[in-house]
Image (cartoon, rainbow, N blue to C red):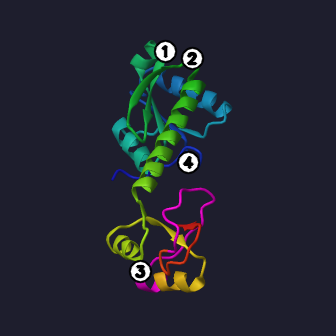
């Protein structure tokens, strides 16, 4: 609902730095110093010193899917810290400017792990098992996602399921518990699991 959420490994901008009260002395200097430190560490970083308000910038970079945001203002500089905000959870973490590279690396890993776990959970929730032909037809007509079933390997069975249930095979997994021991379509004995 609030724009993209990009995984850090593919995001063109991994971190955006948004100076808060940038007109105050030392704020832009601190922001540029963080930018240079992170660039030297190999992070794809952008510092937004435009005249837009910080709230506008926060929203803009959330819509673009930037995984992490760093906020730095006069009070943060006094405390030798900044605020690290996750695009995924929107959690704010106060981190020290000393060792900012490690904090950013941990933040990017956290975003990656959270996105991966969300996707894995979604995959698990949208995968159903069908042992019989009728179960497969029921699942195909009422749910979206994947169906795990046994298949004899015969093209005729695959074409029949495509025609009748509007399903096609996606892969034969190398691993996985069989959901039965007969083909879901013809009933022949088989040990091939298909998604």
In the image, residue 143 lies at what x, y percent? 35, 67
Q: Secondary structure at mark 2?
A: loop
Taking depth in this image into account, of 150 and 18 the one nearest to the observer is 150
In space, the residues marked 4 and 3 are separated at their CA atoms by: 38 Å
Q: Quadrant of residue 39?
A: top right
- Callout in the foreground (1, 4): 4
- Residue interval drawn in magenta: 162-183
Compared across the picture, whether 46 is left or right of 147 comes to right
The circle drawn on residue 98 is: 2
Q: Residue at x 53, y 81 (%)?
A: 158
Q: Earlier in the sequence, mark 1 or mark 4?
A: 4
Residue tagged by mark 1? 80
* Disc 2 + disc 4, Cβ < 8 Å: no
Q: Secondary structure at mark 3?
A: helix
In the image, residue 192 lies at what x, y percent? 59, 68
Q: Residues within 10 Å of mark 1 (few under 14, many from 20)?
A: some
Residue tagged by mark 4? 11
Q: Residue at x 39, y 38 (%)?
A: 89
Q: Residues within 10 Å of mark 3 (few under 14, many from 20)?
A: some
Taking depth in this image into account, of 160 and 15 the one nearest to the observer is 160
* Disc 1 + disc 2, Cβ < 8 Å: yes
The circle drawn on residue 57 is: none
């Amino acid at each position: 609902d609030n724009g993209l959420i990009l995984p850090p490994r593919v995001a063109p901008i991994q971190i955006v730095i948004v100076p808060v009260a940038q007109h105050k002395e030392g704020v832009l200097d601190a922001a540029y110093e963080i930018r240079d430190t992170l660039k030297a560490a190999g992070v794809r970083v952008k510092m937004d010193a435009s005249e837009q308000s910080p709230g506008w910038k926060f929203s803009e970079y959330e819509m673009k899917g930037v995984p992490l945001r760093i906020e730095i203002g006069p009070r943060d500089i006094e405390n030798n810290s900044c605020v690290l905000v996750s695009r995924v959870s929107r959690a704010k973490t106060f981190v020290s400017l000393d060792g900012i590279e490690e904090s950013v690396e941990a933040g990017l890993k956290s975003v990656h792990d959270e996105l991966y776990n969300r996707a894995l959970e979604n995959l698990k929730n949208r995968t159903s098992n069908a042992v019989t032909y009728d179960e497969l037809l029921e699942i195909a007509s009422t749910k979206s996602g994947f169906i795990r079933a046994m298949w004899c390997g015969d093209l005729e069975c695959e074409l029949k399921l495509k025609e009748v249930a509007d399903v096609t095979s996606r892969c034969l997994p190398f691993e996985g518990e069989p959901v039965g021991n007969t083909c879901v379509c013809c009933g022949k004995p088989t040990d091939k699991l298909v998604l």
